[in-house]
Amino acid sequence: MTQQKYSHYSHILKGQRLPALILDYDLLKKNVEDIIKRADGKKIRLASKSIRSVPILKRLLSDYPEFQGILCFSIEEAVFLAEKGLDDLLVAYPSVQAKVIEPVCNLTKEGKFITLMVDSLEQVQTIQAVAAKKNAVINICFDIDMSMHLPGLNFGVYRSSLRSLKNVLDLFDKIKDFENVKVVGIMGYEAQIAGLGDKIPGNPVKAWIVRLLKKISIPKLRKLRKEVVDSLTERGVSLTIKNGGGTGSLRSTSEDSSVNEIAMGSGLFSPTQFDHYKDFKFNPAMFFALEISRNSEGQVFTANGGGYIASGPVGKEKLPTPYLPEGMSLTANEGAGEVQTPIKISGSDIKLGDPVFFRHSKAGEVCERFNEITLISGNQIVEKVPTYRGEGQCFF
Ligand SMILES: Cc1ncc(COP(=O)(O)O)c(C=O)c1O
């Protein structure tokens, strides 16, 4: 892992407005190279929830032919991106709001390749009804549940109700004669491999169990994915999209011949959530800078802002992680605050007005707290680009 020094970033940010969200483009490029190597020839679909900036998405798609298409997190977002000139938009999560689905009809008729996710008859019926009214044919993709169901443990996530080949074929049989929907893909996201760290600090036994469960789960999920792909193909479905994986499963998903594309986003910015995997360590490309505004006492300073807590089950790891200068820590009683964050800083000559740097637990979520991303390369700021929020967009 490559890490810069505090003096490097503080020098570049001199005189800049704080707080600021920073993207070290040199480190991002290193991550991209590593990611492409791990994907081993498979096309990579950018998971936009982990990026949330149109200029960054566009830049990645134009700079690297390995990146093709976007895995969107909402239908409204896909419409927004289509209107911004992007194409090949697979919406990863379903919605049954007719008003939200409607704009997809016109965009599809205009030639955009937009695909909506489904796992139930009701969802497909809703899409069919909206598309029929607009005289359009909307592309749909089956979301296959890849989790491993054990007694007392769902090793994976609760998402799709399509848990078996039979579930998939039952749904397919019910909708195959619908005139205004077309099955173009399947997605099987193995969250328990891709999103679950297996190098757990201070808990080697738990880490060993997670690795063991991962090992057992991989052949099982591959088998289901293959059965689904083969059976739908036998029934005459042409599957343009056979999607799987995420940042933490690049290697294993790349070995799966039933998959023709891997969805991935977090590894690009490399937030702290992805620090604890046995197989890889990407570079901390994204982080944020806070202004030190007071020296409460001795080595305790106060920064403005900082309480950017990540979603998911509550735990300390959802707090921003002190990054640079080294020797910083949050206080147990206050954590990262709504408008003020006390920080203990030892061994560093921090003065009022100086920036201090934190890393977020997740990749894209932090973009919801900032209007722009400051891109740096070498010893300078090269560009400032808007986040979705900076463009007035908030999808969830
Ligand atoms: C359906 C789906 N695919 C892929 C991913 C992987 O995204 P990332 O690489 O940003 O973790 C996710 C993450 O939650 C997801 O929900």
Image: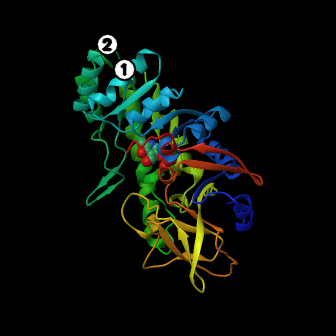
Residue 374: give x, y in percent of width and height: 64, 50
Q: Which residue is mark 1?
A: 105
Q: Quadrant of residue 214?
A: bottom left
- In the image, is 291 to the left or to the right of 253? right
Q: Nearer the viewer, residue 226 or 378?
A: 378
Give the left or right position of residue 140, taking residue 366 as reference: left
Query: Is 24 in front, or is 171?
Result: 24
Residue drawn at point x = 72 percent, y = 66 percent:
5
Residue 255 visible at all: no
Q: Position of residue 82 (x, y in %)?
A: 48, 27
Q: Which amino acid lies under the numbered mark 1 shown in the image of this protein?
A: Cys
Say whether residue 370 is visible.
yes
Residue 193 pos. (x, y %) = 46, 52
Side (left or right) of 96 relative to 320: left
Of helix, strand and loop, which one carries label 1? helix
| Rendered image quadrant of residue 325 | bottom right
Q: Is mark 1 within 8 Å of ligand 1?
A: no
CB within 8 Å, label 2 to label 1: yes
